[in-house]
Image (tube, helix red, strand yellow):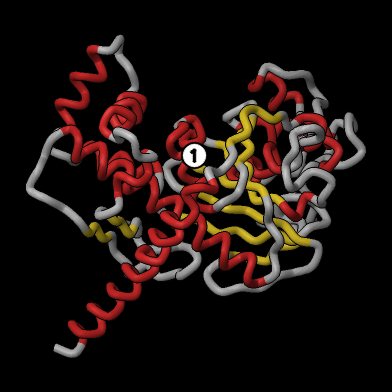
Amino acid sequence: VLGNQILSPGASVGNGLTPEAAKDLGLVEGTAVAASLIDAHAGGLGVIGADVKGHNLPCENHPVTSRLAVICGTSSCHMGISDAPIFMPGVWGPYYSAMVPGFWLNEGGQSATGKLIDHVVRGHVAFPELQAKAAARSAQNIYTYLNSHLDLIKKSLPVGFLTVDLHVWPDFHGNRSPLADLTLKGMVVGLTLYQGLDELALIYLATIQAIALGTRHILETMQFAGHHISTLFLCGGLSKNPLFVQMHADITGKPIVLSKEVESVLVGAAILGACASGDFASVQEAMERMGKIGEIVQPNHRDKRFYDKKYEVFLKLVEHQREYKAIMQGV
């Protein structure tokens, strides 16, 4: 039977751990138990409120509503908060106190991100060659190897410019935000007959760019509806990949703050526990004290025109896909 008591995140639940639960968990009886969050929301809590004083970021001295938390792993979630409810198509919410108590939450997302990159890379005919060469470099991660390979073939160009003729629409598993269309499919434009490691590296790069362009699509939709976002805060497995992070900065034009602790979901859970135990007076105080900044990545504004063009093509891809669908439905 479901109860009818509603508590804000971080509120103390009951009288703490029961003797049975404490024994099972190896903790002390009566240890505070906090009202919890969805996993991605806990990640947002763990990263979005960190103290940024002295880092020369546009969100410094501005409310936390100027920040967007992006939890990027197998799939990705994009979470922005606001003082008043903001409604928009294709982005979930607004939900009151669903992540940060006292604020409204809007949540965008991409159905497949890390999973999509894995799918594209591991399904390529040159993947065995990639595995062998990465292993020969002291078991180097395949994505670290691909990033270094892109640096080798870029010559004098910025690495992102290698995909001038290669474009990906990333909805291989449908679109969650901002189109909310589960019937959409993936698209790749610009394939050749070459099947070597260079081509694998290029389709890997184009896929990462497509995911970042999807984030820009979500971000622009949120801003058009009334959010005022100046800085992205990234965490999760994909935030360990410097190419993924730099493409998000360059394509959105926003600086990116990386969490010192990649597993920000755990930090969010700890924040809730610290509030339930009375160590902090509010979730926002706990966020500021416990969330720690790692690296800051700035966008390369000199490349803006190129990525504006890539974004124009990106939006054309889905427009064309819908045109093709309409043609075939007329058969």
For mark 1, what is the residue?
246
Indicate the position of residue 187 as horizontal and vertical percent values. 26, 60
Q: Is residue 199 left or right of residue 93?
A: left
Work out which quarter of the rendered image holds the N terminus and state it. bottom right
Indicate the position of residue 223 as horizontal and vertical percent values. 64, 65
For this orientation, the residue located farthest to the bottom is: 330
- Displayed quadrant of residue 55: top right
Indicate the position of residue 256 as horizontal and vertical percent values. 60, 41
Can residue 97 be seen here? The reply is yes
For this orientation, the residue located farthest to the left is: 193
Q: What's the residue at 92%, 38% (across, down)?
A: 281
Work out whether residue 61 or residue 97 is closer to the camera in this orientation and state it.
61
Kind of residue at disc 1: Gln
For this orientation, the residue located farthest to the top is: 138
Q: What's the residue at 67%, 46% (across, down)?
A: 37
Asked which secondary structure carries label 1, the reply is helix
167 w.r.t. 322: above or below: above
Indicate the position of residue 166 as horizontal and vertical percent values. 26, 53
Within 10 Å of disc 1 (Cα), the crowding (few <14, some 14-19, many 20+) is many
Can residue 16 be seen here? The reply is no
Q: What's the residue at 30%, 53% (across, down)?
A: 164
Q: Is residue 23 left or right of residue 171?
A: right
